[in-house]
Image: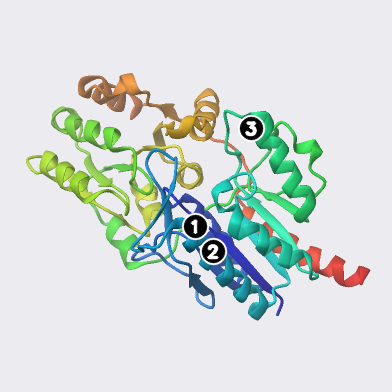
Amino acid sequence: MKKIMFYCQHTLGIGHLVRSMEIVRHLVKDFQVCFIDGGEVIEGFKIPPGVEVINLPPIKTDTEFKQLNAIGNSETIEDILENRKNQLLSIFARYRPDILIIELFPFGRKKFTPELIPLVEAAKSTKTIVVSSLRDISITKKDKIAHEERVCGIMNQYFDVLLIHSDRKLIALEESFSRVSDIKSQVYYTGYVAQQSEVSAEKSAVAKKEKPIILVSVGGGRFGHDLLESVIETAPILKQNIPHHIQIFTGPFVPEEVFSKLKNKAKAQTNITIDKYTPNLIEYMEKADLSISMSGYNTTMNILTTGVKAMMMAFTGNSDREQTMRAEKLEKLGRIQMIRPEDLEPEKLASKIIEYLERQPKKLQLDFNGAEKTSAYLLQLLEKQKTIA
């Protein structure tokens, strides 16, 4: 069986990890997979059977996006990156993959260049196919010209393939990265990568809930606290007008003091339940009458594939327009309603929620087979390489 080494670094939320693991879930049917996780380990996160997972010394970014921070490690970031680089090279030499997949880089993860360039150089010295795995929207930078020049340079020097996990009918990469035509690597749109709902005890438990649900989530939980607070403050108003129960997931990385504050705010409200994390969020989506969330990639896919009504607030930290672009596009198409900062006043938000529950969002016909198509495409690449050889 052919082998894939898959590198994923999540620094803020869990979106990159969730999407990557969904791809791996399908790769493992046709490949032997070694998955390298460079971020904080998430308790309860589901790993597909048969996948070898190696956790590097974990790194995250600070909330100002200015520097990398080690998690539970007193060494300097420079020393940790050096150690991680050596570990990656050792794994590569031992595993000898046919394909190396690196998620997001070089379109993002610039701070991880010291460990990633030596890795792709090692891969290029062999017959390993080097692949960049990218979501629908590139990271948008203030220094756009320099950023795109750098990305094109690295792609053209080291990468054989760019996989874009999007459907051009909704979002083309050119909308966030103007120099796609300058990339000499093979460029392939896989379609969107969507999570599959599984038969589970939690799914059965969710399905049996008698009251209709308003589901509230903010991804990893390091941000979006203002949205959660606002929803909690609307609870008494909503209780007087609609019978729904509000299920909030704060995210596994929510600061403990924030989680305690939210729990205290909600303790007098009988129509709210607050938990940190569920690996089965899509089961709640299937049950919910309404989803209130940020507009990250995976949450958006869950919304689109389940058909749940959705109100979305874009994360705008670090001046990145990724979530704003996605939410604005979907709102324009009549699929979701955006929540803007001025909408967070409790009376106003409650009114919007009650009114939106009466609407019927438009359905979008998109390609959600990105994980399956990724595996099929990589198999074709290896077959083509074998034929040429």
Which residue is nearer to you in this view: 131 or 109? Answer: 109
- Which residue shows up at 57% across the image and 38% down it? 139
Residue 361 screen position, x and y as percent: 46, 30
Label 1 SS: helix
For disc 1, the neighbor class at 10 Å (few under 14, some 14 to 19, many from 20) is few
Residue 301 screen position, x and y as percent: 51, 45
Please indicate whether residue 80 sits to the left or right of residue 89 in the image. left
Residue 187 visible in the picture = no
Q: Which mark is residue 82?
A: 2
Please indicate whether residue 59 sits to the left or right of residue 7 in the image. left
Which residue is nearer to you in this view: 79 or 241? Answer: 79
Q: Which mark is residue 176?
A: 3
Direction right: furthest residue: 388
Residues at circles 1 and 2 in contact by the CB criterion of under 8 Å: yes
Can you tell which quarter of the image residue 375 is in? bottom right
- The residue to which callout 1 is attached is 78
Which residue is nearer to you in this view: 79 or 379? Answer: 79
